[in-house]
Image (cartoon, coloured by chain):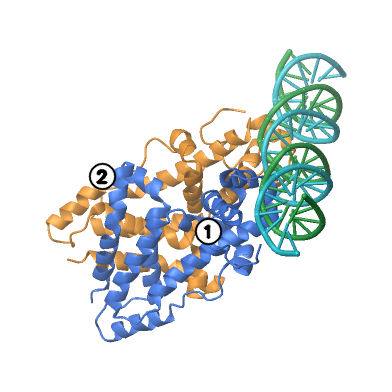
Chain colours: A blue, B orange, C cyan, D green
Amino acid sequence: MAKRETGPEPGSDTTEQKIFDAAHEVFSQKGMDGSTMQEIADRAGINKALLHYYYRSKDKLYEMVARAILTKAVSAVRGVLEVEMPLEEKIRRFIETYIGIISRNTSIPLFIISEINKHPDRFFSNILPQDLPKPHAFFQQVEAEIAAGRIRPIKPQHLIVHIISMCVFPFVGKPLMAVLLGMNPGEMKTFLKERTEEVTQFVLAGLRP
Amino acid sequence: MAKRETGPEPGSDTTEQKIFDAAHEVFSQKGMDGSTMQEIADRAGINKALLHYYYRSKDKLYEMVARAILTKAVSAVRGVLEVEMPLEEKIRRFIETYIGIISRNTSIPLFIISEINKHPDRFFSNILPQDLPKPHAFFQQVEAEIAAGRIRPIKPQHLIVHIISMCVFPFVGKPLMAVLLGMNPGEMKTFLKERTEEVTQFVLAGLRP
DNA sequence: CCAAAAATTAACCAATTGGTTAAACCTTAT
DNA sequence: ATAAGGTTTAACCAATTGGTTAATTTTTGG
């Protein structure tokens, strides 16, 4: 049993990995409070005591899982945000990859949001990675485009929050959106698939001078 | 003890009301799983057995609180969405009142979203009000404006999801947004106050033909 | 004033929680 | 083969959970 920062090497089939996978599944869907060690043990197909053998306590296990989730999510966002690229292309790529990641990991955003709200201290002291995405370059790029008259004046901080909101929220609030729009799961699925294109068009339209 | 649908009359200072208020506070912040009857009793300043005297079980108490929250939220949205009004004015009012409600009840949106995801069956069978907001009229109005060439073509379902997302998400993801944008609580507060105007401007700009 | 009813409490209960312990079960290197 | 190491398990523990019971206090109506 090694002391890693973000869990055992994925892909292997060791007991340690089976426990981590089970914990990842249970925690990401039910959060810290809603999950029990017994359920994680059952899902991993092992005795409850083995959980404490590999990961000392529920808190430690939770911390590892949460850190792995956060690290992956943060690095994904950073990758897109910090590349050099014309603004329109950057926005296109950002929306595309961002929605792509979310639709392949639908339970992650809600996990992050609700757990960070329920245990803020734990997250900010232990779990959140140190090197967060730095949107400074993006902000400067937006200001430059405004100064050049190529886009409408807008506060860059609000623009980025607009974009993130439109990408994330429909997945987080999916059940509510479904009932509001009167869609069944099939219709909802195609609706969410359309969003990449729709959000992109709307953002670019909103930026026209 | 009467059997009401959405809890006792607010404002009164009866024990029943004190319990309901305490439960409202605890449940809305910690959710069903994260809350205990003991904590609710403590916050109400009474014995734990009294909770079961007035509300038979934790489930029943939770159901009443959740139903009260949902009913209030749904009726608030309905009020704005179903009035007859020119489209631009309707959008302005919708964003204004929607953000207004949320900033006066910051814990409610996250409660609804995360609880509906954790206990979907309970919500859709018992808690959600029957008469939800019907956005049909709004959709027709948007289509009419498009046909008249007064706004850019857009699928009305996506438009409304755009708007709701930009209104709700910044409050739900507030801690994350704060760290991403590098803002302290004070800066974050003024940032959120600006959103009514910023979202309105961005939506209207995105709709220009 | 006083008995009946309602409100409130302390004590208790079974079940579940996270966590521990000591024994049993491999694997493996000599 | 066997001693030693790590791995896995059943049994157990104290604390907390939602919930109940019976007794006590407070209110109320005649």
Q: Position of residue B128 (x, y in %)?
A: 44, 38
Q: Residue at x 37, y 76 (%)?
A: A155
State the residue position of label 1.
Answer: A12
Q: Position of residue A25 (x, y in %)?
A: 52, 51
SS class, disc 2: helix
Separation of residues labelled 2 and 1 (CA atoms): 52 Å
Chain hosting mark 1: A
Q: Nearer the viewer, residue B61 or C2?
A: B61
SS class, disc 1: loop
Chain hosting mark 2: B
Would residue A73 be found to the left or right of residue B154 on screen? right
Residue A22, disc: none
Report the amino acid beneath label 1: Ser
Neighbor class of circle 2 (other Cα within 10 Å; few <14, some 14-19, many 20+) is some
In this view, the residue farthest toward the left is B148
Residue A163, compared with residue B28, is above or below; it is below
Would residue D1 be found to the left or right of residue A19 on screen? right
Report the amino acid beneath label 2: His
Would residue B16 be found to the left or right of residue A174 on screen? right
- Quarter of the picture containing the C terminus of chain B is bottom left
Say which quarter of the image contains residue A184.
Answer: top left
- Quarter of the picture containing the N terminus of chain B is top right
Residue A88, compared with residue D13, is above or below; it is below
Neighbor class of circle 1 (other Cα within 10 Å; few <14, some 14-19, many 20+) is few
Residue B136, disc: 2
Residue B106 shows in this picture = no
Q: Position of residue B174 (x, y in %)?
A: 50, 64
